[in-house]
Image: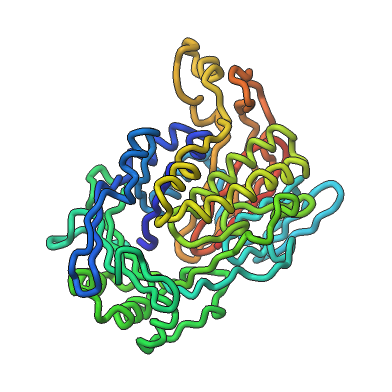
């Protein structure tokens, strides 16, 4: 099984709770919440030991704390939360045509086109939708190469998360190089049996070790690059040959077919204003296609934020271009703030301001829950899954591609600033297209009207 784990921060948890609180609880029930971590230098000497990211007090105050869940588990849980028949595999978006009445989405491999009122490109770093819509070039290579893998816990491994680097704060710039080992939350009943390692180095360090890496030699089939030949494992062992045996014994013993190698790419929002947004006409973007950032968990969290905010504006304005522009106007400055102040090394005050305090307008209402579930109005929590606007992950196996196809009309909660909004029927997307290759991205799946959505990375 490939992929690693994702640090799910409080802002992402709040956004998911606003979409489907039951799904957030399932995330939590399968997660691992690290209590502490240790930092060692490259010689194996302990530098510090601390509570996880120093957020213990914030967790107690706000009731939310970061947890780790496997990437496979995240997409499986969301897939299981979707109605049967939502995801259609082996479909990849190629292009789209826009006119005054809607968007026609075309697919590779001779698949029939899909007609929709709006198109949301959630197709990752190298978004085809973004290229056609904005044509503003690819994301910038951050100068870093990353290797990741999942492994079973074995005797001799630590009991808590550990990091190996040059100092208390990870080295940046051309000297950046570090290694991490941490437990993953999984779908199995037992806990702390699956771990993940992540090793990252600046491309200069990679080349010094005699390993070639071409940041431009990427394909649209996979950002992470499947290395079933074992080349990724060979490369990482060369680059980190002088790291302590405590970590390298674990790395060297990893099944080479589970190791991924990829560059890190970012897309700065410095020049993007709320008025400009990241869409045009009947097309907008979501997740990494809109605001690619370093893998610190905010890729997932911001994508879920995008989804709940997009869902809100679609419910407010219907399936219109006004909904897209309103969504972008709200999320552009928010994404800028989270990327700038929500990273691992941000201060406690920054994390409190940008990760813990923000809230999101729920797409369900407590009072409506009673009407849906047939219980009294004092009942707490969201309506049952089939009555909620939810999120989807486009899921696939290695080399697979997915599209979400036609969905039936279902009941939705009408969101509002005020509580007590009445339950009403709303027509869901009659056609939603989501595509993915060798990994997946987050997509909002349902709202009024016809919304075509594509997702790939």
User: Of residues 98 and 327, which is closer to you in this image?
Assistant: 327
Q: Quadrant of the C terminus?
A: bottom right
- The location of residue 84, given as percent across then percent down, is 52, 40
Corner quadrant of residue 428: top right
Q: Is residue 347 above or below residue 313?
A: below
What residue appears at the point 62 percent right and 27 percent down from the top-left corner? 415
* Outermost right residue: 100
- The location of residue 111, given as percent across then percent down, is 67, 60
Is residue 12 visible to us here? no
Residue 141 is left or right of residue 115, and the answer is left
What residue appears at the point 40 percent right and 34 percent down from the top-left corner? 62
Is residue 347 visible to us here? yes
Q: Is residue 209 above or below residue 183?
A: below
User: Of residues 168 and 205, which is closer to you in this image?
Assistant: 168
User: Of residues 277 and 413, which is closer to you in this image?
Assistant: 277
- The location of residue 179, given as percent across then percent down, is 31, 68
What residue appears at the point 60 percent right and 63 percent down from the top-left corner? 268
Corner quadrant of residue 125: bottom right
* Outermost top residue: 376
- The location of residue 227, given as percent across then percent down, is 40, 75
Residue 122 is left or right of residue 11, and the answer is right
Q: Quadrant of the N terminus?
A: bottom left
Q: What's the coloring here?
A: rainbow
What residue appears at the point 74 percent right and 47 percent down from the top-left corner? 118
Q: How many marks?
A: 0
């Amino acid at each position: 099984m490939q992929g690693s784990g994702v640090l799910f921060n409080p802002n992402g948890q709040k956004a998911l709770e606003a979409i489907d609180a039951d799904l957030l609880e399932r995330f939590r029930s399968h997660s691992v919440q690290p209590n502490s971590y240790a930092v060692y230098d490259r010689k194996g000497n302990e530098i510090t030991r601390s509570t996880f990211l120093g957020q213990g007090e914030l967790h107690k105050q706000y009731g939310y704390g970061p947890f780790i869940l496997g990437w496979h588990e995240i997409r499986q849980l969301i897939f299981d939360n979707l109605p049967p028949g939502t995801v259609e595999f082996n479909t990849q978006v190629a292009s789209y045509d826009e006119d005054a009445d809607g968007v026609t989405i075309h697919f590779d491999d001779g698949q029939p086109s899909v007609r929709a009122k709006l198109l949301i490109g959630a197709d990752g770093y190298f978004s085809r939708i973004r290229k056609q819509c904005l044509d503003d070039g690819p994301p910038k290579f951050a100068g870093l190469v990353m290797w990741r893998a999942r492994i079973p816990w074995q005797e001799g491994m630590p009991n808590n998360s550990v990091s190996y680097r040059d100092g208390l704060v990870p080295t940046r710039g051309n000297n950046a190089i570090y290694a991490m080992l941490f437990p993953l939350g999984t779908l199995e009943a037992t806990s702390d049996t699956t771990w993940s390692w992540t090793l990252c180095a600046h491309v200069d360090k990679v080349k010094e070790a005699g390993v070639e890496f071409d940041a431009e030699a990427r394909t649209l089939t996979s950002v992470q690059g499947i290395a079933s030949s074992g080349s990724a494992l060979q490369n990482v062992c060369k680059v980190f040959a002088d790291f302590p045996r405590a970590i390298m014994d674990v790395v060297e013993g990893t099944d080479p077919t589970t190791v991924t190698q990829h560059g890190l790419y970012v897309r700065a929002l410095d020049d993007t204003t709320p008025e400009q947004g990241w869409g045009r006409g009947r097309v907008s973007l979501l997740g990494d296609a809109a605001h690619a950032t370093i893998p610190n968990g905010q890729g997932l969290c911001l994508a879920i934020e995008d989804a709940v905010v997009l869902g809100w504006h679609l419910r407010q304005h219907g399936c219109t271009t006004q909904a897209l522009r309103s969504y972008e106007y709200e999320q552009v400055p928010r994404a800028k703030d989270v990327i700038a102040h929500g990273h691992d090394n941000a201060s406690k005050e920054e994390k409190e301001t940008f990760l813990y305090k923000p809230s999101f307008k729920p797409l369900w209402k407590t009072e409506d829950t009673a009407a849906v579930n047939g219980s009294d109005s004092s009942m707490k929590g969201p309506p049952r899954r089939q009555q909620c606007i939810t999120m989807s992950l486009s899921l696939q196996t290695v080399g697979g591609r997915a599209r979400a196809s036609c969905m039936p009309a279902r009941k939705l909660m009408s969101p509002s600033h005020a509580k007590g909004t009445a339950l009403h029927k709303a027509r869901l997307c009659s056609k939603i297209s989501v595509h993915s290759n060798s990994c997946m991205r987050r997509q909002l799946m349902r709202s009024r009207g016809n919304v075509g959505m594509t997702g790939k990375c």
